[in-house]
Amino acid sequence: MAQIFHRSTNTISKVSLVTAVLGAGALLAFAYSMDRGSYITDVKVVKEQPVPFSHKHHVTDDGIDCRYCHTSVEKSAVAGLPATEICMGCHSQIWSNAAILEPVRASFRSGESLQWTRVHDLPDFVYFNHSIHLNKGIGCASCHGRVDLMPLMYKENTLYMNWCLECHRNPEKFVRPRDQVFNMAYEAPANQEELGKKLVQEYHIQSLTDCYTCHR
C-alpha cells in the first residue's frame, strides 16, 4: 500500500506539538508577568495629584513626622489624609505665594477638600487596619517603602494577598520594636528572627491567615 503521508510529517507533527506546548507556557508566563507588572499593579507608577507633594522634601529635608499629616494612623483603620488646614499651618507662613501651592490656598478659601488620587487603594472586599499593624510593631516602610526618599509618591509593593500572607505567616521576620515603627531608615538587625520571636510574644502577635482576618 502506498504511503499516504510524507516522511517529514512525523517531524512536522513533533515540532508542532513542542511549539504548542512552548507557546502555551510562554503565554502563561506573559500573563503572569503582566499580572505582577506595573501595568496592572501600579507599582513604581507615579499618580498625578492636584499638588506635586514631595515626601522627600517634607520628611527628609524638613524632618516632619508621618503622624503630623496622617493624624489618625495610630488609632484608626485609616491613616487619614491631611486637612488643608494642616498644610496651611506652615504654608500660610512659608512659600505662601508659590504658584504650585495655589490649589491648597484655593481649597482653604473655599472649604472644599483637595481631591487627592489614592496611591494605595485596596479593593472594597479587603479590610486593613493601620492602627493594629503599627501597634504590633510593623513599620510604615514595611508596606509603603522608603516614602521619605520619594520626591513624588508611588506604590512600592503590590499589596497582593500572597504578599501580605508572607508577613502574616512569619511575623517574626518583619516585626520591629514599637519605638522604631516610624523610623523610615530602620534596618532589620542580624538577629532579626531571634528578636522577632521575642517581640511576637511580647506584642501578642498571632499568625492570622484565615479568610475572615481580611475579608469581612
Image (cartoon, rainbow, N blue to C red):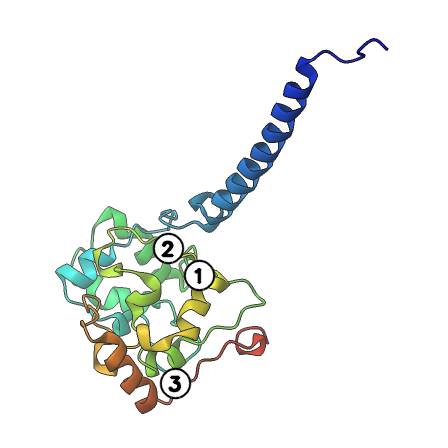
User: Which SS class for mark 3?
Assistant: loop
In this picture, residue 171 sits left or right of residue 65: right
Query: Which label belongs to residue 150?
Result: none
Between circles 2 and 3, the one closer to the viewer is 3
Residue 156 coordinates in the image, percent (x, y)? 34, 56
Question: Which label's residue is closer to the chain start, 3 or 1?
Answer: 1
Of the pair 154 and 185, the residue shown nearer to us? 185
Instruction: Decide if residue 214 is on the left or right side of residue 204.
Output: right
Query: Which residue extends farthest right?
Result: 1
Question: Which residue shows up at 32% across the image and 57% down it?
Answer: 104
**Secondary structure state at the residue bearing disc 2:** loop
Question: Going by the image, does 42 lie left or right of 183?
Answer: right
For mark 3, what is the residue? 205
Q: What whole-number distance in Å separates the C-alpha atoms at marks 2 and 3?
A: 26 Å
Neighbour tally class for label 1: few under 14, some 14-19, many 20 plus, Cα within 10 Å:
some
As measured in the structure, the alpha-carbon distance from the residue carrying label 2 to the one carrying label 1 is 9 Å
Does the CB distance between marks 2 and 1 fall below 8 Å?
yes
As helix, strand or loop, the secondary structure at mark 1 comes to loop
- Taking the spot 43% from the left edge, 49% from the top edge, the residue there is 42
Q: As displayed, is residue 59 above or below residue 212?
A: above
Q: Residues within 10 Å of mark 3 (few under 14, many from 20)?
A: some
Please, what is the three-letter code of the amino acid marked with disc 1?
A: Leu
Q: Nearer the viewer, residue 141 or 201?
A: 201
Amino acid type assigned to the residue bearing label 2 in the image: Lys
Q: Which mark is residue 155?
A: 2
Q: Which residue is mark 1?
A: 159
